[in-house]
Image (cartoon, rainbow, N blue to C red):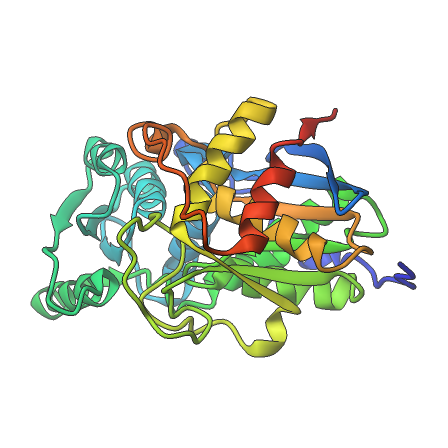
Amino acid sequence: MNRGPTGPPCLGTEFPLPTAGAGELGIGGTPLVPLVLPVCGIGRRLWLKLEGANAYGSIKARTAHALIEHLEHHGGLEPGGSIVESTSGNLGVALAGICRARGYRCTLVVDRDTPRRSITLMADAGADVVLVEPTADGNPVAERLRMVRRILAADRRMRWTDQYGSPANPNVHEHWTGPELARGIGAVGPDAVVAAISTGGTLAGLSGYFRRAHPNTTIVGVDAVGSAATGGERGARPAKIPGFGSGRRSSFLRPGDWDVCVRVADEYAAPACRVVRAATGLTLGGSSGAALLGAVVAARGDPDLREIGVICPDLGAAYLNTIYAGRRPPPPESEPALREGLADLAAARRRG
């Protein structure tokens, strides 16, 4: 692939590593682990950015840090103040930890799909956890946000971090996660960058950086079947992976933010995690499995994608009793591209 010249890495605009609060040490600088596997007879290298190595266990540590900083500088969050957020798990854990370190009160709205381990970690960090019940329309994000609005109306001193609309969400990935990934892979940059989609902030931020600094890098978004995040029709997701896809359209993403969008059913993301663990020993979270499978599907469609950066949002500790406890295979008659991708992942080997 003739990738041509690339722009400067824009190092002067990167976020510095966080310094405020002892509980925030360990955000950023996450490991980059290469997996080598054959796809359509071509050797590919998937560079796994293991964001589960962040403090608080996920890429949401970066997001939470940025959201709090934004409120402190632009949103009226004062010492001893309170924040509220809707969360499916990982962001809530990070917000709870950072609020404890900075002396803020934290109210987190969760639903029945939120992993029990995540709820326990939030509460242990001192957060007030509010559980919303399922509704007839089956849209937990909408119900969580209704609860957030009620909490804000009841206490005007409360501040909403707003992971769904705050510019701090994509900005932290444009100016910190993206450059960090590119530096780890090499000066020329990867042939492709892959990220699973929830709020869309990670993909939007990565796209902003790579479009500018490495314009020949293919941007691959991985959305869930039944998710509305990228504009599709929301549908039933009985095997829903927390933090993957969304019941609402992303306010950050525009069609030009990705070159390829791969739809991965939850029923395939879980087996992808198990296949990768059997092949490599890596225990990854559900959206990480979806991202890896989406990366392989994209590679099957483009022989020029040889060096592929994959954002792995978290590790598998929160999923041991769900994804890794089950053994149900995906339906045999469905999604041949995803089934072939699973077979490719089974041949992956770690390098470095």
Q: Can residue 214 be seen in this view?
A: yes
Q: Is residue 53 visible?
A: no
Point out residue 74 in the picture as x, y percentages from the top left corner: 40, 67
Say whether residue 72 is left or right of residue 257.
left
Determine whether 102 is above or below 173 in the image. Answer: above
Point out residue 105 in the picture as x, y percentages from the top left corner: 21, 47
In the picture, the quarter occupied by the C terminus is top right
- Residue 50, located in which quarter of the rendered image? top right
- Residue 327, located in which quarter of the rendered image? top left
Say whether residue 60 is left or right of residue 132.
right
Determine whether 240 is above or below 2 in the image. Answer: above
* Residue plotted at (26% across, 53% down): 238
* Residue plotted at (62% across, 57% down): 175
* Residue plotted at (35% across, 36% down): 328
Q: Which of 322 and 341 is in front in this view?
A: 341
Point out residue 242 in the picture as x, y percentages from the top left corner: 33, 48
In the picture, the quarter occupied by the N terminus is bottom right
Say whether residue 102 is left or right of residue 225.
left
Point out residue 225 in the picture as x, y percentages from the top left corner: 41, 61
Determine whether 58 is above or below 162 in the image. Answer: above
* Residue plotted at (85% across, 52% down): 188
Q: Which of 44 and 82 is in front in this view?
A: 44
Q: Nearer the viewer, residue 289 or 58?
A: 289
How many callouts does the rendering have? Answer: 0
Say whether residue 326 is left or right of residue 156.
right
Q: Which of 24 and 28 is in front in this view?
A: 28
